[in-house]
Amino acid sequence: MLNVAQLMTLKPVSVSPDDSLAVVKQIFDHVKFHHVLVVENGILLGVLSDRDLFKALSPHIGTAAETPRDLATLNKKVHQVMRRKPVTLQPQAKVMDAIHLFNSEGVSCIPVVDSNNRPQGIISWRDIIRALDRTDKRTEP
């Protein structure tokens, strides 16, 4: 049985709780992942998803209808919109533990932390689907 350390993404991107949403928007605009970890002094404080960012920003940013008030939403701080105390797993947790949390908690990523709540990686349901797809291809005749 696989454990999450075998499937997790190492070195997930992290931001500070005092970073602006403009910083997070810049990250999401240039990468193909959907979550950043919020870390302070090496300790996980929360998670911010692209959906959380989308909900916090004005829909008029970058359009002809944009106003200074819309742009001000980019100045909000990460700690104002992040999900605090996210569900986490340790690296030795089984993939089935992650699947259970995805189903019961309604999350789409799980930070993987050590016993001191220091991020080691991140696992998403996509990581598990990719692993199953690779496993299935190896067992085909």
Image (cartoon, rainbow, N blue to C red):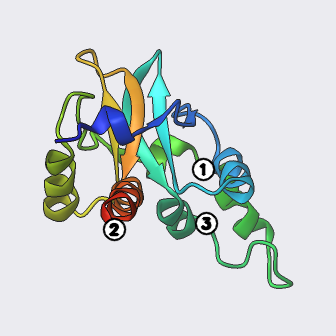
Pointer 1: residues within 10 angstroms few (<14), some, or many (20+)? Answer: some
User: Which residue was labeled with disc 3?
Assistant: 57
Q: Viewed as shown, does residue 16 lie left or right of 117?
A: right
Quadrant containing the N terminus in the rendered view: top left
User: Which residue was labeled with disc 2?
Assistant: 140
Asked which secondary structure carries label 1, the reply is loop
Instruction: Say which label, 2 or 1, has the lower sequence index.
Output: 1
Q: Residue 8: which quarter of the image? A: top left
Residue farthest along the bottom direction in this orientation: 65
Amino acid marked by disc 1: Lys
Of tags 2 and 1, which is closer to the observer? 2
Q: In terms of depth relative to the viewer, which is nearer, 113 or 132?
A: 132
Instruction: Say which label, 2 or 3, has the lower sequence index.
Output: 3
Amino acid marked by disc 2: Glu
Picture residue at 71% right of the left edge, 69% below the top: 70
Of tags 2 and 3, which is closer to the observer? 2
User: Which residue was labeled with disc 1?
Assistant: 76
Q: CA distance from mark 2 to mark 1?
A: 51 Å
Q: CA distance from mark 3 to mark 1?
A: 9 Å
Tell me where residue 122 appears, x and y as whole percent.
40, 40
Residue farthest along the right direction in this orientation: 64
Asked which secondary structure carries label 3, the reply is loop
Quadrant containing the C terminus in the rendered view: bottom left
Q: Viewed as shown, does residue 4 lie left or right of 74?
A: left
Tell me where residue 41 appears, x and y as whole percent.
47, 15
